[in-house]
Image (cartoon, grey):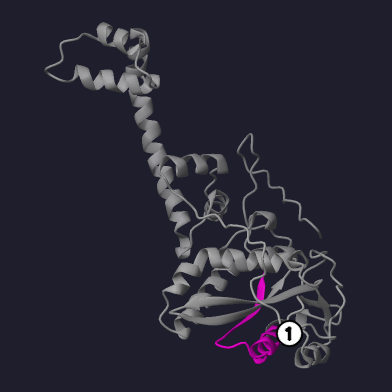
Amino acid sequence: MGIQAPAEVKFAIIYEAIRQDQNLLNISQMCRIAGVSRSGFYAWMDAAPTRKTREDNDQADFELVLEAYRFRGYAKGARGIHMRLLHQGIIMNVKKIRRLMDKYHLVCPIRKANPYRRMAKALATSNVAPNVVRREFRQKPRKVLLTDITYLFFSDEKCYLSTVLDAFTHEILAWQLSQNLKVDFVLETVDRLVRGYGSTLDNETIVHSDQGCHYTSYAFIRKLRDSEFIQSMSRRGNCWDNAPQESFFGHMKDDICEKISSCASFDDVKSQVDDWIDYYNKDRYQWELLKLSPAEYCRYLQTGIYPLPVYDSKSKSNTGALPQTPGV
């Protein structure tokens, strides 16, 4: 009865055995004991240079994978690595990247679904705007802007992050960090939005939120009216009505929650958040954005110039064709 192991493992054991001075068995005997053919062993021996070349190539490719994985200090999955390499002019398919990650035990944390709301909301008021968006997020750039608040823990303290996200390009257009939940920091987020992007916004721009007390406050409603924005709100308790914003917070916490928890001060947290949002906008590539970052995707929509080489998957040659832009 042969040894229960893959043939390549058996061949490797036989090879190591015949190199030992104290070995008393010949190749035929060891092959018979291992349950493999002698011709198979010799074929395996003849293929040693090919295996060495393959192993060297895998090692070199994994170095590229590892560099992309560590880019800007944030871990990535196989598709994120693929897109990062593509931005470096390196073509490596996702299947190969996954194989190398498995082979060398490179693991990316997977975000767990959370069916619950992140924050307890204040009592309902009568200032609830209609759900104008109705989950039709991808209308056109700068048309649907999503906003929300999340919390971040550091050094046994808590701070709060308010953001505005363009539902079409996925860019974070404005953000504000605060040490308390006073409505002012939400108003400042809108002010930053207007200062940074006011020329690209108009009276058809929709600002969509949940029904939290900040967004039903008179101050926030007045701020939107003064800016001539349309206010929209999710149905109560329905996180899917603001899904892209929820998803953004989830990915952000996946990447920086551990770093934030080790921050010693509020200023350290702010520095970390600022760096990650800069990374997210400029260098965190998204599959649904044609493998571009939000900022790159926005420029592509404006100029029509796709910044990456487009390769035919079979011939692996540059086709010169532009990918189809979804939802435009």
Res. 170 in view = no
Drawn side of residue 152 relative to residue 141, left or right: left
Residue 283 position within the rendered picture, expressed as x and y whole percent measured from the top left:
56, 64
Residue 148 position within the rendered picture, expressed as x and y whole percent measured from the top left:
69, 76
| Residue picked out by circle 1 | 213
Q: Quadrant of the N terminus?
A: top left
Drawn side of residue 208 relative to residue 108, left or right: right
Q: Measuring 54% from the left and 54% from the top, which residue is drawn there?
A: 110
Q: Is residue 64 above or below residue 122?
A: above
Residue 4 position within the rendered picture, expressed as x and y whole percent measured from the top left:
38, 19
Front-lying residue, 81 or 149:
149
Q: Which residues are magenta?
A: 170-195
Q: Quadrant of the C terminus?
A: bottom right
Q: Is residue 157 above or below residue 170?
A: below
Q: Measuring 34% from the left and 16% from the top, which residue is drawn there?
A: 3
Front-lying residue, 298 or 153:
153
Q: Amino acid at mark 1?
A: Cys
Q: Is residue 181 above or below residue 59?
A: below
Quarter-of-image position of residue 311: top right
Q: Measuring 48% from the left and 76% from the top, which residue is drawn there?
A: 272
Instruction: Indicate yes or no whether the magenta region holds residue 62.
Output: no
Numbered marks: total? 1
Label 1 packing within 10 angstroms: few (<14), some (14-19), many (20+): some
Residue 38 position within the rendered picture, expressed as x and y whole percent measured from the top left:
33, 8
Drawn side of residue 283 relative to residue 19, left or right: right
Drawn side of residue 178 relative to residue 167, left or right: left
Front-lying residue, 267 or 193:
267
Q: Secondary structure at mark 1?
A: loop
